[in-house]
Amino acid sequence: MKMRKTAIAFAAGLAVAGTLWTGGAAGAQTTAPARVLGPSCSVLGCSSVVNDSNIVATALRNWCLSTGSTGTLTTTRPACGTQSTYLLGSKGSHTPWDQDWDVLQVDAGWCYYVKFTLPGQPDNYTRYDRRGKSAGWVKVEDFSDAHVLGQSQTSCP
């Protein structure tokens, strides 16, 4: 019996290590395929944006500002070279897992509720209230995921 428990513990440890190595987090609520590093990803992995809300959201490819970390909001639209945008449909739509998407756009007049995940770190929940204000852009660092949990024009979800 002791040998069986040891084998199960070892297998569970390998599963957790494999999950963390491929970019997931043990016990994470979302299931993502293993990430293959794309050309713009760092050695840590790719950043991504996931839309878990019922309303369309927008991601931008490159942060290209000299300052900021995950969750930093700027009112200056990151514009470098040919800035790509990605329109995220509702409920589970996400940027391609093998590509690096560094920016979440918070639309003018809206409040967004966002969860940031990073393996080995506690989740970070932040509200970005742009009601009555111009749009904002939020940085998503490599190997982080930004999950848009809610959006509203009338209140902050």
Image (cartoon, helix red, strand yellow):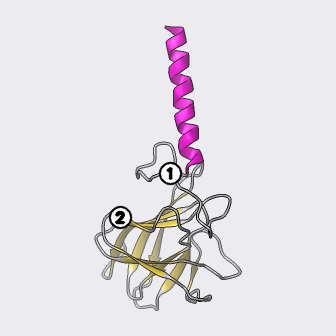
- Mark 1 highlights which residue? 34
Residue at (50, 22) in percent of width and height: 8
Give residue 157's position: percent from left, percent from top.
Answer: 35, 70
Q: Amino acid at mark 2?
A: Asp
Q: Main secondary structure of the magenta part?
A: helix
Task: Please tell me in which quadrant of the rendered image residue 150 appears.
Answer: bottom left
> Going from the N terminus, do you reach mark 1 or mark 2 first?
1
Q: How many marks do you count on the picture?
A: 2
| Placement of 129 over or under 54, stated as above or below | below
Element under label 1? Answer: loop
- Mark 2 highlights which residue? 52
| Placement of 128 over or under 23, stated as above or below | below
Which span is picked out in magenta?
A: 1-22
| Placement of 47 over or under 4, stated as above or below | below
| Residue nearest the observer in this picture, 67 or 6 | 6
Q: Amino acid at mark 1?
A: Ala
